[in-house]
Amino acid sequence: MKKTWIVPCCALGMLLYAGTAQAAFWQVLRDTPVRADAAAGAKVLGTAQKGWIVSDMTGDGSSPQWIRMVEFQTKAGEGMAYAHFVYKVPDAYIRAADVVQVADENGTPLQKAGTAAAATAQGVRVERMVAPQVTDLACNGAVDGAVLKAALEAWVQACNAILGRLEGMEPDEAAMTMLAWADEDPFASADVEAMDKHMAALLDRWLSARYGHPQTPLGADDQKVLALLAAYGLVPQMAEGITFFAADVSALRKRVSFEPPVAAYSDYMSLRDSQPSVLFTDGGCRYPVKEMGTWAVQWERYLNTVPADSVYFKEGKKRYLEFMTHILFSDLPNTPAFPRYNKNRMEKTWMAALQSVALENPGTQTSTLITEFLGKIKANDNRLSAAYGEALWNKMRSPSFPRTK
């Protein structure tokens, strides 16, 4: 008799557990992966689509960053996600920032969301790219639509793989990871080069329209394709006579947000994005000395807002030195600071531009340094002595320059 009650009792126990442990229902706000663990590198079990309802059956499974489910299953045709209490099934997790709690006590999900977990969730929110639709690629023969679609789908997959690495990180960790993208894009060369190969003819037409003599205007279909590629973070570039697509990393970074916000990161990216991403091409600088000097001053002011031992100071200092090295020491063949054709003397127009930067930014250490620099080289027939150049470079690279708060 006892044995005959074991299975029913176990089943009843499980049902009671499921009934009493049910904590909440959550509505998915955006397409988001469901993971086997609360970690960025965890196995992805599936994708919860926007509008789905996720039920939390664990009782105590909710955390500031993750909603924990016992099992993730989809029910075909109903557009919903369920969490079932099943013995020995791995847990499933969905980011709290991607769902909103539905206020309903009888178990029937409401259409209107209640208290938003996303508003209070701590962590990193990633907006993944969505693969292009066929209707997006109607190009009237300007390019092969099927080829473009396949190339873009591969690109979207590469972008989402990079964005996915940030999920589950702490905001500061993710911010520091993306700072590295500023100097070195996160893509494997093959990711971008694939688009160069497929769009070679389009790049040739773009080159002719931009740099040809005479210029051949781009057709409406070509402009449409370029606009579509730009929307996916791919922009045409030219260097040393070679055309290629470059990743617009700033567009990728804008798909990531933090809660709470990371002010030092936001200020860094805001300043970075306000300045050109390509400064030097074909052996020369693309911008005037005064403009480069002004950008250096902007970075000095940023450095005064962050701790000197932070990664933000380190990365900001790189940008500061990039501008200062050019305006004081440039040895680029097409824009040297001390050209050989002028007997290694700095030209008066260059010196005048430096003087303008110093006068327009009084009180900055950059202004003080430029004033000292101009005095030294004027005393040396507008030439830079090796000894002073080395001393100045060491000063600029020292941790105490520029001094910060």
Image (cartoon, helix red, strand yellow):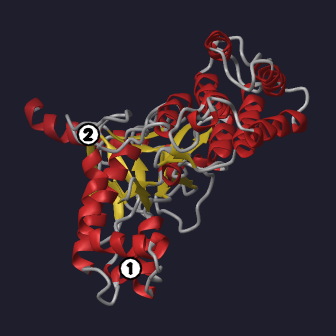
Q: Is residue 159 above or below residue 39?
A: below
Q: Quadrant of residue 341?
A: top right
Q: Is residue 66 visible?
A: yes
Whichever of labels 2 and 1 marks the residue nearer the N terminus, that label is 2
> Real-space Cα distance between discs 2 and 1?
31 Å
Q: Is residue 194 above or below residue 296?
A: below
Up-down relation of residue 72 to residue 397 (above or below)? below
- The foreground one among 133 and 50 is 133
Q: Quadrant of residue 310?
A: top right
**Near-viewer residue (341 or 125):** 341
Give percent across and percent down for residue 81. 34, 58
The reply, left or right, for residue 53 in relation to residue 300 is left
Q: What numbered label is drawn on residue 136?
A: 1
Residue at 76%, 40% (x, y): give it. 294
Q: Amino acid at mark 1?
A: Asp
Q: Residue at x 29, y 49 (%)?
A: 72
Q: Is residue 160 above or below residue 90?
A: below
Q: What residue is shown with label 2? A: 43
State yes or no: discs 2 and 1 in contact (Cβ < 8 Å).
no
Which quadrant of the figure contains the C terminus? top right
Residue 30 x %, y %: 47, 59
* Left or right of 215 in this view: 121: right
Identity of the residue drawn at 31% across and 65% down = 152
Q: Could you say which is closer to the camera, residue 8 or residue 329? A: 329
Q: Amino acid at mark 2?
A: Lys
The reply, left or right, for residue 349 in relation to residue 225 is right
